[in-house]
Amino acid sequence: MKFADRMSRLGTETAFEVLVKARALEAQGRNIIHLEIGEPDFDTPRHVIEAGKAALDQGWTHYGPSQGLPELRQSIAAYVAKTRNIDVDPAQVCVVPGGKPIIFFPIMALLQEGDEAIYPNPGFPIYESMINFSGATGVPIPLVEERGFSFDLDVFKKSLTAKTRMVILNSPQNPTGGVIPEEDIRAIAELVHDRDLIVLSDEIYERMSYGKRPLSIASLPGMQEKTIILDGFSKTYAMTGWRMGFGVMNTTLAAAVSKLMVNSNSCTASFTQRAGIAALDGPQDEAEAMIAEFRKRRDLFLAGLNSIPGFRCRVPEGAFYAFPNITATGVPSKQLAEELLNVAGVACLDGACFGQFGTGYLRFSYANSTANLEEALNRIRKHMASR
């Protein structure tokens, strides 16, 4: 079978590949602590589950509008307006099955051969994959550890050209847990404000910040019309398996995204959208408790990592990832990630899975129990001492 050339430009998401390897080891009787997959280990809030069950009983099992149920788009518009301090019309909202379509669809709608797109590196690998798939040229901007894994603004400025059609931001960030400082967001907005480009602002971890709430670039003067906000339910409400994300964008682009939905998925499942309404409009105590627990785990895990010789990890300001620099161990990050899985029984990711500038780092998800995190630290410490 001969595949189209474009298939060779598609990347993948290594977390799922490592998960498969870890499951294979478990099938052989090994005990593996899973710190590789970016997924809350909590259950979906009970009232959201009940809303989904009720929706099934009420017959919400049929096609819905490609752009999303009007009631959910209204709830999303109100939620985003409140959390980002902007005015949002439901016509600007597109509901999609997971967050990735709000990467895939706008890139397919806006980028073509000869265009350039700036994206963070290390960063979520689907950014680069989709840019390459579109035929555009990706321009990776290294995230600087000493700046809390924000851009070097001089490098960013020099990377902007007449061909730049998209800038991708992610804050709080995967894989580093970094939050772009407010002054950097303002500086980036100043640099792109008058350019013919659009900003894709991936804010899927927006609620998972442990200090001052991240500033959305869409809230700055003149930026809402040229910003796509990517958000969803997977992280905040532990709804990864429900497959529901959303984008907020100008209505012209929203129409194009809806057209791509018609041609690919038809619509997002109606009963999950009813559950989404309950998530946004209902009690927030379970979601807030989950985030508070992640903060406790972060503090525990970071203290443990930084006590291991050769490990140096900045405190992540958001999400649920630790991204330690392990260059002082003298072990290549890819090799160490494989050793930790195969020898120590701790599944994590080589930082290079997130781009060339992630080499020399590991990514751990601390979305696991305190007991498992403590055991993982013990195993890592023991393994490093025995090398």
Image (spheres, rainbow, N blue to C red):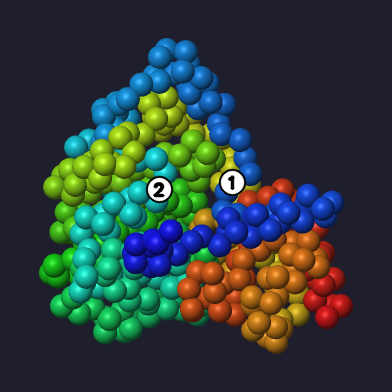
Q: Quadrant of the N terminus?
A: bottom left
What is the x, y in percent for residue 358? 52, 75
Give the vertical position of 309 relative to 263 (above or below). Answer: below
Please state, as top left, top right, bottom left or bottom right, where the C terminus lies in the image: bottom right
Q: Quadrant of residue 113?
A: bottom left
- Give the mark nearer the N terminus: 2 vs 1: 1
Q: Which mark is residue 222?
A: none
Q: Secondary structure at mark 2?
A: loop
Dot 1: element: loop
Task: Report whether residue 147 is seen.
Answer: no
Q: Nearer the viewer, residue 213 or 130?
A: 130
| x, y percent for residue 180 | 40, 66
Residue on which disc 1 sits: 40
Tell me if 19 is positioned left or right of 67 in this view: right
Q: Which residue is mark 2?
A: 99
Q: Where 143 sits versus 46, above or below?
A: below
Mark 1 belongs to which amino acid? Pro
**Position in image of residue 107 (x %, y %):** 27, 59
The residue under the point 73% across, 54% down is: 24
Give the residue drawn at x 45%, y 48%: 207
Where is residue 190, by image quadrant?
bottom left
220 vs 175, left or right, is left
Question: Circle 1: is it few (<14), some (14-19), or many (20+) Cα within 10 Å?
Answer: many
Report the Cα–Cα distance between label 2 and label 1: 15 Å
Q: Amino acid at mark 2?
A: Gly
* Residue 117 coordinates in the image, percent (x, y): 28, 70
Q: Which one is in front, 16 or 364?
A: 16
Quadrant in the rendering for residue 381: bottom right
